[in-house]
Amino acid sequence: MIPLTIALLLAVVTRASAVNLPEYIHVCKRRDPNVENCISQSVEYLRPYLVKGVPERNIPSLEPLLLKELVAAEGTGIRISARNVHAYGASDFTVKRLKIDLDKLRFEVDINLPHLYIDGMYEIAGRVLLLPISGTGPMQGNFTQCTGAVRMQGALRKDKAGEDHLYYSDFRMKISIGKGNLRLENLFGGERTLGDVVNAAINNNFDAFIRELKPLIEKALSESFLEISNRIVEPFTYKQLFPDN
């Protein structure tokens, strides 16, 4: 959920310089020497609208934040997917660091999230913490002291009219969870005793469990959010997104 928050933050802020803007959008100019501070202020202007969402501008609500499907697979033995995941608390983020180089089209954002609660549907098969694990069903999770970092590389390409459009050629993210617990219902076809044992093992070794799965999830999320971000900025020219004046 942390990377999705960052991706939405970057996408909304990047979009914030387009023409015919509503009054709640705080515009940041390309050559503003304090553009990073300007964008940080833009986030605060936008926060109430991020909570509710702005459907007419294709901005989804962050409360709850909906992630329709996520699939992470690894060749040595585990596959996990989640769908219809709702996350609560995503709007309560703070920007820890923001670095933007518009000449090189590089975007970096680090954020803190104090608490996230999620629920959704999962499917898992393979081995985790040396334990065989399989099942499909509801899941719930509580996560605290979360941080996220996104690094995006942009590039320009011309349309048929010769106008430059921004697109992202690379999107990489890192996530960190301070503390958390997870509950996977219906493991092993509903075998309650075995399911309780595996859930207890996961939560007693939560750091190791997350560390094992994190590279898979980061890769899957990076690919998904690269597509989302490009879909949002594609209709606009670079001059619209980041005007000189």
Image (cartoon, helix red, strand yellow):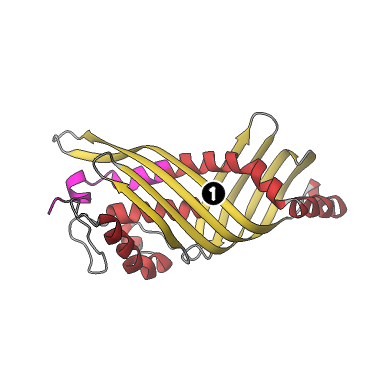
Name the quadrant containing residue 131. Answer: top right
Judge whether residue 231 is colored magenta. Answer: yes
For the question of whether residue 1 can be seen, the reply is no
The residue beneath circle 1 is: 175
Residue name at image x 57 percent, y 51 percent: 176
User: Where residue 44 appears, x then y in whole percent?
Assistant: 35, 67
The kind of residue on which mark 1 rests is Ile
User: Where residue 71 appears, x then y in whole percent?
Assistant: 58, 41
Is 112 placed left or right of 216 in the picture?
A: left
Q: Is residue 52 above or below residue 237?
A: below
Is 161 placed left or right of 103 in the picture?
A: left
At label 1, counting other C-alpha atoms closer than 10 Å, the crowd grade (few under 14, some 14-19, many 20 or more) is some
Name the quadrant containing residue 216. Answer: top right
Q: Is residue 71 above or below residue 191?
A: above
User: Where residue 118 appears, x then y in whole percent?
Assistant: 60, 60
Please report the bounds of the magenta region as a residue range.
226-245
For the question of whether residue 138 can be seen, the reply is yes
Residue name at image x 51 percent, y 44 percent: 221
**Outermost residue toward the right in this view:** 193
> If the image is split into quadrants, where does the C terminus sit?
bottom left
Front position in the image: 70 or 171: 171
Number of labels in the image equals 1
Front position in the image: 172 or 82: 172
Judge whether residue 83 is colored magenta. Answer: no
